[in-house]
Amino acid sequence: MVRFGAVALLIVCAAAAMVSAVVVSPWWWFAGFLIGVLALVGCYDLLQRRHSVLRNYPVLGHARFLLEAIRPELQQYFVERNYDGRPYDRDTRSIVYERAKGVDAEEPFGSERDMYSRGYEFLVPSMHPVDMPKHPPRVRVGGPDCTRPYDMALLNVSAMSFGSLSGNAVLALNTGAARGGFAHDTGEGGLSEYHLKPGGDIIWEIGTGYFGCRTKDGDFDPDKFREKAAHPAVKCVSLKLSQGAKPGIGGVLPGSKVNSEIAQVRGVPEGETVISPPYHRAFGTPRELVRFLARMRELADGKPVGFKLCPGSRVQFLAVCKAMLAEDITPDFIIVDGAEGGTGAAPLEFADHLGMPLTEGLITVHNALVGAGLRDRIRVGASGKVATGADIVKRLAMGADWTNAARAMMFAVGCIQAQRCHTNRCPTGVTTQDPRRARALDVVDKSERVRRYQEATVSSALQIMAAMGASGPGDLGPHLVRRRATDADDFRSYAELYEWLKPGELIVDPPTGWAADWKAADPDSFTG
């Protein structure tokens, strides 16, 4: 009865205010109007059947939904500490923002990290540091069958599609890449004018939907692929098998979002919902995969071709290695995407529970290639929460040749981690197709921020390497990364924590920990 009494009281108050407006002063009309609106809201709350909270607490219950709506902002700005935010803590975001703005990313008074907690990691400094190289090293990508190799930077823009990002965000990223001399991965959403107009180096990613090179039925179109791969800005082609945030699931782009521009870029009908299947139609076995990669390289006129995956089963990846050996075909590169990677939208269960984290995934791929005697023919990239110079050094020490960053690059163009990517209401114009919101992102300013962030972060990585006594990535190794294994004084290097294979060891005499998986791997099947 209390809930009915509260609404009745509002009605009585509204009526009294209206009477006062006539008898006392016209100013009472304002109070009467406001109270009347609240009374109408209360009546609606009592009659509706969707929300029990509102039926029991009319009017007042709306405060609960308001607080729930702004909870992420309250958490980020007023509750979380500098080092415990998710997915990126405030310290990491601040480093990216400061470097993007050209401000020194310095921290006074020491670290806030708990260095005595289990799992704490550190990089091993040298008692005899070396000088930093004057110019950042680059990685030559191109195996024995590649005739047009590409020199990759240590940090590049990871895969983000036009459609997920606004046109202005893509323009800013590619302009920054052009100015800074690093690569920009298109994501699987197709090759748009926003990727090509600034002139930055492009890694063209092709997913299961074959956007930009598909037939009307959704199959791979070799003629369209050849035409677009010939563009001088396209330096490499990456076939996406899976991504970290949602391995094993296809994407759905609602028809309401498929405007004429996106339809043209993706090669799909305007206004119709686009479904990307979870698997590739062009191949169904590891052997067919490596043959398809060879076909893509031929169609691309010898440009580097590789694939991206979020590893899950070691047996399945070893099956791909066996297929490479059997066919004598290798990709020029493999990009390992960790399960901690980001996405515009994914089911929570996929983001939380499927796929290997980057550390285990990277070490698995690197070791498998070494053990199969293939590592010297294939370069390995790493993506998944790479944001700082320390992140780059850690991944290089674990076996990567270069790194990619997506969300950190979004921070550089203005992302504030509002986590509204899937709503089309991004407050900074980064992940939206709303022209009014996207207009807020100034391409000239943000592209320079992207360039500065990449340059400063690579410089930080080189400075860390020099402090470790390493003149370049080739001097790094897993022995230089240490982890506290227990709460006691028990630090172990990654060389001790993981088993590291010798070149060709799987072929000659597989070690006990790998023998069963190597035997089970079938080049003609992805099972296992």
Image (cartoon, grey):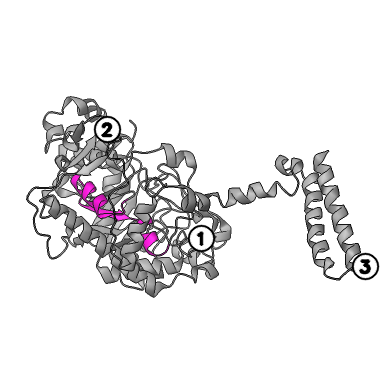
**Disc number lying in front (1 or 2):** 1
Q: Kindly report which numbered mark, 1 or 3, lies closer to the viewer in this rendering.
A: 3
Q: In this picture, is 353 found above or below 416? A: above
Residue ID for mark 2: 522
Q: Which residue lies under the disc numbered 3? A: 23
Residues packed near mark 1 inside 10 Å, few (<14), some (14 to 19) or many (20 plus) = many
The answer to whether residue 41 is above or below residue 24 is: above
The question of residue 404 being in magenta is answered with yes
Foreground of the two, 314 or 493: 493
**Residue sitting at x 47%, y 46%:** 346
Task: Give the amino acid type for the residue marked by disc 3 in the picture.
Answer: Val
The amino acid pointed to by label 2 is Asp
Whichever of labels 1 and 3 marks the residue nearer the N terminus, that label is: 3
Secondary element under disc 2, as helix, strand or loop, is loop
Q: Tell me which corner region of the image, top left, top right, bottom left or bottom right, holds residue 351.
A: top left
| Drawn side of residue 384 relative to residue 490, left or right | right
Label 3 or label 2, whichever lies nearer to me, is: 3
Q: Badge 3: few (under 14), some or many (20 or more) residues near its Cα, within 10 Å?
A: few
Residue 244: numbered disc: none
Relative placement, left or right, of 145 versus 282 is left
**Tags 1 and 3 in contact by the CB under 8 Å rule?**
no
Q: Position of residue 470 (x, y in %)?
A: 11, 52
Quadrant in the rendering for residue 46: top right
Look at mark 1 in the image and give the residue it sits on.
426
| SS at mark 1 in the image | loop
Residue at left 75%, top 40%? Answer: 56
Q: Give the extent of the magenta segment.
A: 386-414
Can you say which quadrant of the picture contains the N terminus? Answer: top right
Upstream in sequence: badge 3 or badge 2 = 3
